[in-house]
């Protein structure tokens, strides 16, 4: 199945400086991605695209035969970003799974607790 890796989609080059993928559904039918787009003018936007399929080999949107990003309207950008990041956190090996594994490690948890308590006493010493 055709698939365009969203990390390499930098069009239009005159606008997009870099792309940070928030969620990529991968090489599955109707694959899609959401990204934080860092623009050359210093702004950031949330972008969305379909990654490609049998009907549209380079995905959608596209311009002049090159894959591009659709800019999500500002009024819904925060909601789209939150959902996209949540999907990536929930996947196997994602952030949530990492936190659960850390919490299950009692030795590591005790070391983290000791470290936090040390920070509290360091901060208390500065108030004198």
Image (cartoon, rainbow, N blue to C red):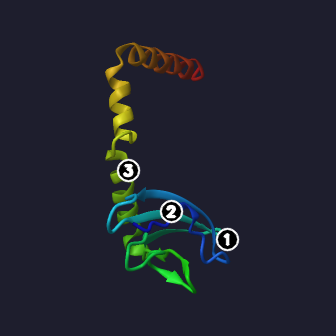
Q: Position of residue 1 (x, y in %)?
A: 39, 66
Mark 2 vs mark 3: which is more N-terminal?
2
Q: Position of residue 7 (x, y in %)?
A: 54, 61
Tell me the residue that label 3 is attached to.
88
Work out how far the residue at label 1 is from the one at label 2, CA to CA, in angstroms: 21 Å
Secondary structure under the numbered disc 2 in the rendered image: loop
Q: Nearer the viewer, mark 3 or mark 1?
A: 3
Q: Nearer the viewer, mark 1 or mark 2?
A: 2
- The structure residue drawn at horizontal position 44% and vertical position 75%, both measured from the top left corner, is 59
Work out how far the residue at label 2 is from the one at label 3, CA to CA, in angstroms: 16 Å
Q: Are marks 3 and 1 in contact (CB under 8 Å)?
A: no
Mark 3 closeness class: few <14, some 14–19, many ≥20 residues within 10 Å = some
Q: Is residue 126 left or right of residue 80?
A: right
Q: Nearer the viewer, mark 2 or mark 3?
A: 2
Q: Position of residue 5 (x, y in %)?
A: 50, 62
Tell me the residue that label 2 is attached to.
5
Tell me the residue that label 1 is attached to.
40
Q: Kindly indicate the quadrant of the structure image that contains residue 10.
A: bottom right
- The structure residue drawn at horizontal position 40% and vertical position 61%, both measured from the top left corner, is 81
């Amino acid at each position: 199945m055709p698939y365009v890796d969203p990390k390499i989609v930098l069009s239009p080059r005159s606008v997009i400086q870099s792309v940070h993928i928030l969620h990529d559904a991968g090489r599955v039918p109707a694959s899609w991605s959401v990204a934080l787009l860092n623009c050359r003018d210093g702004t950031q936007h949330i972008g969305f695209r379909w990654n490609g399929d049998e009907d549209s080999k380079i995905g959608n949107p596209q311009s002049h035969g090159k894959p591009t990003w659709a800019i999500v309207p500002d009024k819904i950008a925060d909601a789209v970003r939150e959902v996209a990041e949540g999907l990536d956190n929930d996947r196997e090996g994602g952030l949530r799974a990492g936190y659960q594994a850390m919490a299950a490690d009692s030795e590591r948890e005790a070391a983290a607790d000791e470290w936090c308590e040390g920070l509290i006493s360091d901060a208390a010493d500065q108030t004198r």
